[in-house]
Amino acid sequence: MAQQQAIKEAGAAMDLSQHTPSLAGSVLECPDGHGGSLLIRIQNMACTANLGVRLDLKQIALRCRNTEFNPRRFAAVIMRLREPKATALLFASGRMVVTGNKSSHNCALAAKKFSFIVSKVGFQPAPLIDFKIQNVVGTVDVGFPIRLEGVVYAHPTFSSYEPELFPGLIYRLAQPRVVFLIFVSGKVVITGAKTEEQMVEGLKKVYPILMEFRKSETASERPGAPVIGGVAADGVVKRGPGRPRGSKNKGKELKSQDGGAVASI
C-alpha cells in the first residue's frame, strides 16, 4: 500500500505549469527589440514518462491496433494515435517516449491515452512517473537574408559552418542550452529547448547577431539597372550582341571560289 501511495503521489507531482501555452496554440511571440515581434511556430515536442511496470511487447503488438514491432530492428513497440496525433515508443522496461505533438497539453494527454491502452491489454500501469518534456522544436523566419560567413568568423566559439556538408550554420547557446540552425534565406530552426520560455529567451539573444550580419542588397542585384555605353550605372559591363564566346572561326577569312578574300570574321 505504501508503494502504491508513493506512485500516486509521484504521478500527481507531474507539473506542466512551466509550459504556458500561448493564445495562438503552437505559436509563440518573441519581441525583436525594435518594436516588432517574431513568431516562433512549434513543430514538435518530445516527452518521456515511466509506466512503472514491465511490459510484454509481443502481447501489446498483437492485441493493439496501429502498432509496429520488429525486435530485430528496434527493441520497442511503435504505437500511433489519431487524436491527438502522436507516436509513442514503448520499451519492455516500462519507459515511454511520446513525440509528434505541438503543445505540452497534447503531450500529457497523449501519454495518458497510451497508458490507458496498455491497461486494456492486461497490464497495470501506474500514473505517469517522471513525466518530462525533453525537447521542443520550433521554426522562425527573421525576414531577411543572413551572411553566414560573417557569423561564423565573428563567433567561432559558438558556431560551426560547413557548407559542403550542410547548408545551415549551427549556433549553440550556452545559456539557455538551445541550438539554432540558421540558413542564408533567414529561416531558423530552434531545437534543444526544454520549455517554450527557453526558445523565446534564446531567440532574443541570437536575433541581434543576425541583424548585425544582415545581407544588404547591392546595386548590381537590383533589376533594371540602366546601361550607358555598354556599362551599367552600377559599373557592371554589359556585353552586346556580338560574336559568342569561344567561336572557332575567330581570325579566319572567307574565300571565294577564285581564292580571293572577301570578308574576315
Image (spheres, grey):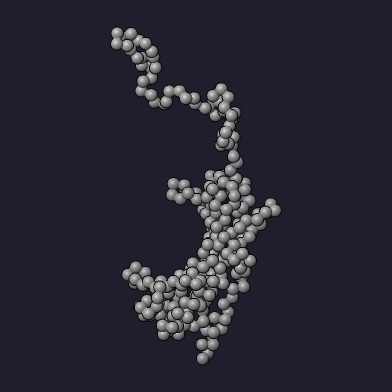
Residue farthest along the right direction in this orientation: 35
Q: From the viewer's perspective, is residue 122 above or below residue 23?
A: below
Q: From the viewer's perspective, is residue 231 above or below residue 211?
A: above
Please indicate whether residue 97 sits to the left or right of residue 206 in the image: left
- Find residue 72 and report its horizontal and vertical position in percent: 32, 70
Q: Residue at x 49, y 26 (%)?
A: 239
Q: From the viewer's perspective, is residue 61 above or below residue 243?
A: below
Q: Residue at x 58, y 36 (%)?
A: 222
- Find residue 59 and report its horizontal and vertical position in percent: 36, 80
Residue nearest the viewer, comparing 140 with 159 = 140
In the rendered image, the quadrant that contains the C terminus is top left
- Find residue 212 and report its horizontal and vertical position in percent: 62, 46
Residue farthest along the front direction in this orientation: 257
Residue nearest the viewer, comparing 139 with 262 = 262
Please indicate whether residue 28 sits to the left or right of residue 57 in the image: right
Q: Residue at x 37, y 11 (%)?
A: 262
Total of numbered circles in the picture? 0
Residue farthest along the bottom direction in this orientation: 1
Please indicate whether residue 238 sits to the left or right of residue 20 in the image: left
Q: Residue at x 54, y 66 (%)?
A: 102
Residue nearest the viewer, comparing 241 with 104 = 241
- Find residue 27 and report its horizontal and vertical position in percent: 59, 62
Within the image, what quadrant is residue 249 found in?
A: top left
Q: Is residue 107 visible?
A: yes
Q: Is residue 204 visible?
A: no
Q: From the viewer's perspective, is residue 238 above or below residue 138?
A: above
